[in-house]
Amino acid sequence: MRVLFLAHAYPRHDADPVGSFVGNLAVALRDRDVDVTVSAPSAAGLAPFEHVNGIPVHRFRYAPDRYETLAYTGTMGAQVRETLSGKAAMLSYLVAAFRAARSLARRERFDLVHAHWWFPGGLVASGLARTAHLPFVTTLHGSDLRLATTFPFGRTLFQRVSGDARAMTAVSSWLARGAEELAPDRRVTVAPMPVLTDLFHPGEAREADLMLFVGKLTAQKGLARLLRAMTRMHRRARLAVVGTGRVDDAGLRTLARELGLEERIEWLPLLTQPELAAQYRRAALHVVPALDEGLGLTAVESLLSETPVVGFRSGGLPDIVLEGVAGRLVEAGDEPALAEALDAILADHDTRRAMGVAGRAHAMQRFGAAAASERYAQLYRRVVREAAQH
């Protein structure tokens, strides 16, 4: 079977963390006799065609160099919402993405299209389905669901994509419920992306009072909530923050200084996957203070590293963290409760160790490459079979 992936974020090199979960699926599907080709946007320094981890990737231009900033930065939604240049770039992106996908479909024979994120990929796939009659599957990863309710015509466009798709998946049950509320006639299947179980593994040299935060430093990711919670903790824990520099983080650094936390925080940039894996093995626990997170694959990576996770009972995180078994989840936004949970787990080495072992076993079963790729391979075969009958 041959499948065309459409993604606005796909790894730019073998160890790139950006869109790595999409790349992981493409690689894992090879063991299921599914050959993936990727159509993704260009960016500075990227070749028009290359292989990333053995997967052929075609990259299309959509604007002059200075305006090709929508992809890979994590700020696509903000640019489109807040600036005229962002809106113009998005219109150009949609046209260029459609032309690139249609050109690939004409040159190569694909059995179906898998659009990652309903927008912009799902909208492009919808146009391709109507013109090239290629069935498509679309997957919701989190941020794209918010677009359906916050952008003009978002709900209408989402319902069009939902109606045209042969199947829709979401990486968490929370996302699936949200999608079904927007499109009541659509049944959404929960099917998480795979995580590299060989790369993310336990280690021995942990730092007993080191907590870890991983993610873009946006308000939704919740680092400010964690900083305030740290001032309520009894333990003088340290924090490694991975992901600085992707968005303006001056306000968070100022907040850390004002709260007297500056000397206890290590600010790290976006790391490669192997570098990030080393951080999971180093930390005593991983904190996910986000609200309405689509899934939270960093939490999966942490569990695979036998690092317990503490966070809010919100979004897709309850799909990952078994309460009291692989970590602790507290009421969404409750900073005092977060501080209490962090203190409790940091104080109990035996509990941390037991949670780590249980968390890895759960993550292997639920998010391992074999299980995730088999779910999607079965879905593809069903979609192709049903499309042929119509």
Image (tube, rainbow, N blue to C red):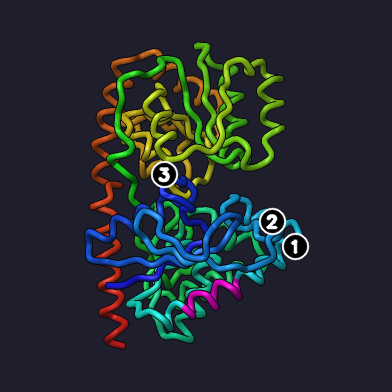
Taking 261 as reference, is 250 above or below it? Answer: below
Question: Where does the magenta region start and end?
Answer: 94-103
Q: Quadrant of residue 95?
A: bottom right
x and y percentages locating residue 178 in the rendered image: 48, 58
Q: Which residue is mark 2?
A: 79
Residue type beneath disc 3? Leu
In percent of the image, x 36 and y 28: which residue is there? 307
Residue 118 visible somewhere in the drawing = no
Q: Residues at badges 3 and 2 in contact (C-beta under 8 Å)?
A: no
Looking at the image, tell me whether mark 3 or mark 2 is earlier in sequence order: 2
Secondary structure predominantly adopted by residues drawn in magenta: helix
Q: Give the residue at mark 1.
A: 85
Q: Which quarter of the picture shows residue 115?
A: bottom left
The amino acid beneath tag 1 is: Ser
User: Which residue matches tag 3?
Assistant: 297
Q: CA distance from mark 1 to mark 2?
A: 8 Å
Task: State the SS at label 3.
Answer: helix
Asked if 203 appears above or below 359 in the picture, the reply is: above
Q: Is residue 70 left or right of residue 329?
A: right
Dot 1 or dot 3: first in sequence order is 1
- Whether residues under marks 1 and 3 lie with C-beta atoms below 8 angstroms apart, the answer is no
Mark whose residue sits in front, 1 or 3? 1
Q: Are marks 1 and 2 in contact (CB under 8 Å)?
A: yes
